[in-house]
Image: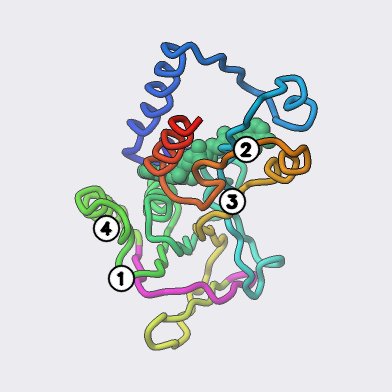
């Protein structure tokens, strides 16, 4: 999904490169397998390393179940019906909010990007961020810093300024797009624990972070094994 964001195509290289490294190291790779008890029993491993990632976080807020709300993954995977006028509510100020806002603006949506920080992309590398902000400006994306999501209804999104606590209302909104971070996906860990297997967690299933940290976690566990 990361490589589907504008100007992030090179991100896919991490998969190509690490897949090749695994092939060279003689790792037996099976794709398209959903790991459950029967798969684990079939492999009968001495130890299992879980790298099951994370899923989008949907916080509780007023209107969550009634307003037109989608998340960034649904947008990127083409599973979301997104209206003309969009508010992107970005809690993380990382690549996702800034990228989804750009993608939607490129596709003709009218976009407001509300970010819980002092600028979009606050947590990412500054040259990447500044170039993105320049493109958002050219595309006419309205950037709203210092905003936390408070609620939504059928045509408005309610924000709160994080320093003044005052309400900021975005009117005439068709769709709210959530970029609210991730939660670990570790249901397989419950299975593995129940089976009494030696196991290790790496990457976002410990805590959602970055690809770099996921690779580093994997390296440490690999060396330990
Ligand atoms: C849109 C987007 C942009 C990002 N951009 C960047 C960036 O620019 N730089 C950066 O460093 N990070 C970026 N990240 C974060 C980065 O992608 C993650 O931190 C990283 O992919 C975590 O790696 P992982 O191996 O822990 O989990 P993932 O890459 O999420 O992989 C987990 C895999 O496990 C699979 N899985 C789950 N359960 C099962 C099961 N039961 N059986 C079999 N398979 C299962 C999932 O389908 C998935 O393929 C981005 C994330 C997103 C969503």
Comes first in the chain, label 1 or label 4? 1
Position of residue 207 in the picture relative to residue 97 (left or right) = right
Q: CA distance from mark 4 to mark 2?
A: 47 Å
Label 4–label 2 contact, CB within 8 A:
no
Label 2–label 3 contact, CB within 8 A:
no
Comes first in the chain, label 3 or label 4? 4
Comes first in the chain, label 1 or label 2? 1
Residue annotated with mark 2: 199
SS majority, magenta: strand
Of badges 3 and 4, nearer the viewer stands 3
Mark 2 packing: few (<14 Cα in 10 Å), some, or many (20+)?
Answer: some
Q: Indicate which disc residue 98 carries.
A: none
Residue placed most toward the observer, 20 or 181: 20
| Pointer 3 residue Cβ closer than 8 Å to ligand 1 | no
Of badges 1 and 3, nearer the viewer stands 3
Per the rendered image, the range of residues in magenta is 142-155
Residue placed most toward the observer, 54 or 98: 54
Q: CA distance from mark 2 to mark 3?
A: 16 Å
Q: Indicate which disc residue 184 carries.
A: 3
Compared with 193, 92 (above or below) is below
Could you say whether the residue bearing mark 4 is in a helix, strand or loop? helix
Q: Indicate which disc residue 137 carries.
A: 4
Label 1–label 2 contact, CB within 8 A:
no
Comes first in the chain, label 4 or label 2? 4
Residue 107 seen by the camera: no
Could you say whether the residue bearing mark 1 is in a helix, strand or loop? loop
Give percent across and percent down for residue 42.
76, 20
Give percent across and percent down for residue 117.
35, 69
Seen at 59% across and 51% down, the residue is: 184
């Amino acid at each position: 999904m990361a490589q589907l964001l504008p100007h992030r195509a090179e991100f896919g290289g991490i998969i190509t490169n690490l897949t090749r490294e695994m092939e060279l190291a003689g790792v037996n790779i099976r794709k398209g397998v959903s790991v459950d008890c029967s798969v684990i029993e079939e492999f009968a491993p001495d130890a299992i390393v879980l790298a099951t990632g994370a899923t989008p976080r949907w916080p509780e807020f007023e209107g969550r179940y009634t307003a037109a709300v989608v998340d960034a993954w649904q947008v990127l995977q083409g599973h979301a019906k997104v209206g003309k006028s969009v508010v992107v509510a970005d809690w993380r100020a990382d690549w996702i909010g800034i990228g989804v806002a750009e993608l939607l603006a490129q596709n003709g949506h009218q976009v407001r990007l509300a970010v819980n920080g002092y600028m979009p992309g606050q947590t990412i590398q500054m040259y990447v961020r500044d170039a993105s902000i320049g493109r958002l400006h050219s595309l006419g994306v309205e950037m709203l810093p210092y905003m936390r999501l408070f609620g939504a209804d059928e045509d408005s999104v309610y924000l709160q300024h994080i320093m003044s606590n005052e309400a900021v209302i975005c009117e005439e909104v068709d769709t709210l797009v959530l970029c609210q971070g991730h939660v670990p996906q570790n249901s397989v860990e419950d299975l593995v624990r129940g089976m009494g297997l030696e196991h290790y967690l790496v990457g976002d299933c410990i805590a959602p972070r970055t690809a770099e940290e996921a690779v580093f976690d994997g390296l440490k566990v690999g060396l330990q094994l």
